[in-house]
Amino acid sequence: MALIAPSILSADFLQLGKDVDMVNNSAADWFHLDVMDGRFVPNISFGLPVISAIGRQAKKTLDVHLMIVEPEKYVQAFAAAGAHNLTVHIEASTHLHRTIQTIKAEGMKAGVAVNPHTPIHLLNDIIEELDLVCLMSVNPGFGGQQFIPQTLKKIQQLRQLIGESNSNALIEIDGGVTLNNAKTIIEAGADVLVAGNTVFNAADPIATIAALKQL
Ligand code: DX5
Ligand code: ZN
């Protein structure tokens, strides 16, 4: 049974409070919050004030995924906005070890996200510091894209790396998760499934979250 993290990127922003309550009342475990800057990724989403507002109503962990350049500049600000997990991209953080220590010093769980082309072995010397690894199973920037099958092999490689090291990191899969492929993804070794389009464009989002949770 995996943790389920609905991605608010696919919510109805005009009725955000309603969608936050839906997640509160569902079997979901986390809120996944995608921050995009139009520089690291070719899209702009939402930022600190929106996350603070969601945090006032959310009853579950705020899992914040930063798709921004120079994420180290904003660690304190996201802690103040209410983030519980803060994930930065390995491709965007030159001094990743320091950034991870800063995230933990601010009282948050520390995550690293890796793009589809980034090899797992680049995590060898940081894995023991991490609470979470977010494997991108699409190229980041947009919801509703197709799952990249190569990710399954990366999940297995990462599971092996975690097993061989002194790491408790959770494996989170982000992008293109559906009711059809979720079981295979869990069997490959995933701990957390992010789901945007699959949840928020479903006829019955609560039932869809429950179905993902039961796999
Ligand atoms: C993509 C984001 C994802 C996105 C996933 O850049 O990081 O979290 O919301 O959306 P779906 O589940 O629709 O692929
Ligand atoms: Zn994400």
Image (cartoon, grey):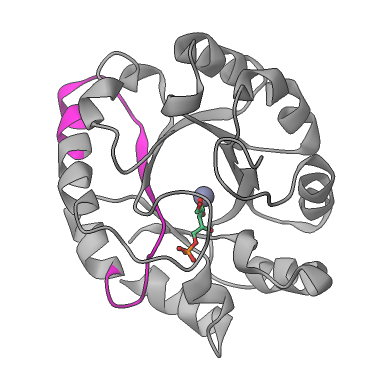
Residue 199 in percent (x, y) is at 52, 74
Q: Is 184 situated above or below 22?
A: above
In front of the other: 101 or 99: 99
Q: Quadrant of residue 204?
A: bottom right
List x then y, in percent, for residue 43. 62, 50
The tally of labels here is 0
Residue 178 belongs to magenta span: yes
- What range of the chain is rendered magenta? 159-181
Residue 151 in view of the camera: yes
Determine whether, in the image, residue 74 is placed left or right of residue 94.
right
Q: Quadrant of the N terminus?
A: bottom left
Location of residue 155 (image quadrant) = top left
Q: Which residue is found at the position 57% from the left and 19% from the top?
A: 104
The C terminus sits in image quarter: bottom left
Instruction: Tell me, yes or no, whether the highlighted magenta stretch contains residue 136.
Output: no
Image height of 12 relative to 165, above or below: below
Query: Residue shown at 72%/29% (left/top)?
Result: 79
Which residue occupies the foreground of this view, 98 or 90?
90
In the rendering, at what x and y percent does residue 32 appear?
Answer: 58, 53
Relative to residue 214, is residue 149 depicted above or below? above
